[in-house]
Image (cartoon, rainbow, N blue to C red):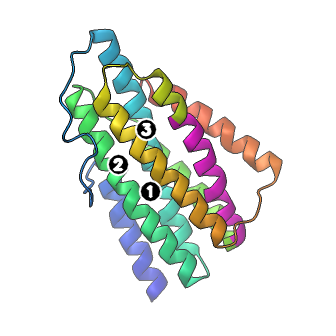
């Protein structure tokens, strides 16, 4: 019964994520910063990067929901739930920033969510150690891509930078927590496949 309840809760969360309904439990890091003058080109570039980040958070929700639902360990499941709540903050912050930039979230969000959920479920079925290893590798790749965003965001876009910087700090903590719980190193072919999927996602989400 507990598993069924978790699946129902997860389905409700999936609908809210794909509908763009997210509630932040922490203040937006950019709230106190004034909007700076951005050129049209800068605004479009910032929006593209923040749309990529929003898609990343859609995928994170799906991964953690699936991994938590199929986890065999209560402590591991609680970690997925804690990380998922912080990722929902990121989801809300990036959606708000996209609105401020007069842009939108990805039109492909249902596809991103569904694909990430299947990956999360598959990793969870391989056992908690591999599932946590997926978190460590995911967060490593996300940290690298957020570092790149901090380098390429327009210098005047302090609001987007504040959000991305806080996201980066949270992702590092999620990876460390997963490692502390006994994450196993993923085989190189899986890491390579994850990098390939991430490349497709970031390329499409920047525009669509």
Mark 2 residue element: helix
Which span is picked out in magenta? 129-146
Q: Is residue 46 above or below residue 160?
A: above
- How far, Cα to Cα, is label 1 from label 2? 9 Å
Quarter of the image holding residue 5? bottom left
At 77% from the left edge and 56% from the top edge, which residue is drawn?
186
Mark drawn on residue 91: 2
In the image, is residue 102 above or below residue 72? Answer: above
Q: Which residue is mark 1?
A: 61
- On the picture, is 49 further left or further right than 131? left
Q: Residue at x 75, y 49 (%)?
A: 190
Q: Quick check: 205 left or right of 99?
A: right
Relative to 84, residue 68 above or below: below
Taking the view exactly as shown, the residue that stands out farthest to the bottom is 1
Which structural element holds mark 1? helix
Towards the viewer: 43 or 33 = 33
In the visual, does 123 lie left or right of 10?
Answer: right
Disc number at residue 53?
3
| Place of residue 142 in the rendered image (x, y in percent of width and height, measured from the top left) | 56, 43
Q: Decide: few, some or many residues near mark 2? Use Cα within 10 Å; few <14, some 14-19, many ≥20.
A: many
Q: Quadrant of the C terminus?
A: top left
Picture layout, residue 126 above or below residue 185: below
Q: How many marks?
A: 3
Residue 106 showing in the rendered view: no
Magenta stretch: dominant secondary structure: helix
> Does the residue at mark 1 contact the one at mark 2 (Cβ under 8 Å)?
yes
Q: Is residue 162 magenta?
A: no
Task: Decide: few, some or many residues near mark 3? Use Cα within 10 Å; few <14, some 14-19, many ≥20.
Answer: many
């Amino acid at each position: 019964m507990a598993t069924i309840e978790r699946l129902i809760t997860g389905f409700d969360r999936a609908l809210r994520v794909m509908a763009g309904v997210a509630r932040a439990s922490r203040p937006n890091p950019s709230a106190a910063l004034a909007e700076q003058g951005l050129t049209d080109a800068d605004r479009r570039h910032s929006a593209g990067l923040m749309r990529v980040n929003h898609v990343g958070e859609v995928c994170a929700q799906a991964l953690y929901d699936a991994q938590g639902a199929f986890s065999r360990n209560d402590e591991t499941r609680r970690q997925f739930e804690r990380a998922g709540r912080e990722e929902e903050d990121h989801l809300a912050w990036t959606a708000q920033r996209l609105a401020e930039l007069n842009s939108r979230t990805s039109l492909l969000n249902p596809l991103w969510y569904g694909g990430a959920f299947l990956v999360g479920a598959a990793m969870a079925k391989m056992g908690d150690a591999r599932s946590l290893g997926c978190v460590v590798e995911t967060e490593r790749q996300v940290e690298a891509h957020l570092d790149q965003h901090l380098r390429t965001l327009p210098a005047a876009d302090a609001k987007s930078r504040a959000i991305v910087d806080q996201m980066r700090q949270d992702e590092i903590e999620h990876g460390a927590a997963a490692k502390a719980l006994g994450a196993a190193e993923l085989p190189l072919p899986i890491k390579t496949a994850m990098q390939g999927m991430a490349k497709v996602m970031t390329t499409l989400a920047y525009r669509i």
